[in-house]
Amino acid sequence: MANNRQPFNVMIVGQAGRLQYEAVLFAASLRHCDPNFAGRLIVAEPQPGPLWNNDPSIRQPEVRALLEQLGAEIVPFENRLFGQAYPAGNKIEGLAALPAGEPFVFFDTDTLITGPLSEVPFDFDRPSASLRREDTWPTPELYGPGYHGIWASLYDKFGLDIGPTIDASQPEEYWQRYMYFNAGWFFHRCPREFGARFAEYAVAVRDEPPESIVCQEIYPWLDQIVLPLVIHSFGGGRHTIPEGLLDGDVSCHYRVFPLLYARENDRVVDVLETVTAANKIKKVLKGYEPIKRMIFQRRGHRVRALFDREFLPRREQMIRNRIKREKLWMR
């Protein structure tokens, strides 16, 4: 059946170290699971500059060559706001490297595509983001403002109405009552518009936080603190695409390989091990020790045997601790 959905581009960040190898995995999984994807796969690459201690670019020629063979375009960008002090800011600043006015979907590089991404019915006029998250921010203090006071002050700072973002089905002062996303994926009709506002809000919260959050840690959560505000400002919200696609049948934000093997379903493991089986990919990925040991030396299956995926521990930290006790943790 013909796919008449609106074409769009995909952005990930690629840079020296772990992310360059994850970028190869992402590109390989996209081509394997969605061979009809017609958009551009853009690997946004930070360039060396005064905000970095070392050169963050992809310096291994074999990695660059493989990414290009997999259909990725490596597009450079300059860091003017974050850099070494907050590498997650690359997902904010890198949006400026994408073509203006063309819809995009951003993914964290530690993601696998496991289904036909091009068939997801994105509503690019109503942005959204990942709801696969825990209550990582804020942590209200006993005598300080609660969840409502903290979030309301952030919306007020940017002249936004918190009212439409409240999930009234959740109890007052419960974290899920307030719009909070994982920044592992998000989308919009224009990367330049979205990125400019994302940067504006992030810098404002970093440099002039409302009084209600002066005692809150903003790192590494800054992108997730401001993402709900940005999405709301563009008329988006929760669930603007059907549930069960991203973070479901079509994508998996695995984060680190021990967690992938511990908790993800068999389809995810099958995609991972299928796309890494080709010699040209295996040869490059062996340069990254966690991939070499987890996938090619099959330590991941030792991790997998520790858990029943129907009855996983409720908190991620409990999963991590079990893997570390068995001396199988790698990042």
Image (cartoon, rainbow, N blue to C red):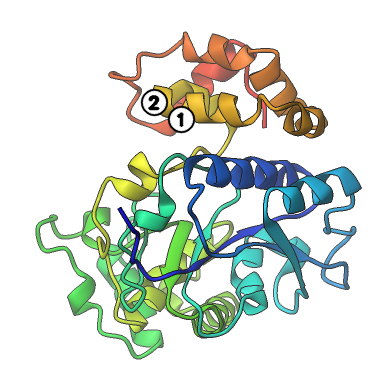
Residue picked out by circle 2: 265
**CA–CA distance in space, label 2 to label 1:** 6 Å
Asked if the residue at tag 1 contacts the one at tag 2, i.e. Cβ–Cβ closer than 8 Å, the answer is yes
* Depth order, front residue of 285/159: 285
Does residue 305 lie above or below 322 as drawn? above
Q: Is residue 175 left or right of residue 196?
A: left
Spot occupied by residue 110 in the image (x, y as percentages of width and height): 58, 44
* Depth order, front residue of 71/94: 71
Q: Is residue 221 left or right of residue 21?
A: left
Residue 317's tag is none
> What type is the residue that disc 2 sits on?
Asn
- Corner quadrant of residue 178: bottom left
Residue 268's tag is 1
Q: Say whether residue 162 is visible.
A: yes
Mark 2: few, some, or many residues within 10 Å (few <14, many ≥20)? some
Spot occupied by residue 266 in the image (x, y as percentages of width and height): 41, 22
Spot occupied by residue 55 in the image (x, y as percentages of width and height): 89, 59
> What type is the residue that disc 1 sits on?
Val
Does residue 312 lie above or below 225 as drawn? above
Q: Quadrant of the C terminus?
A: top right
Spot occupied by residue 124 in the image (x, y as percentages of width and height): 36, 74
* Depth order, front residue of 323/32: 32
Element marked by disc 1: helix
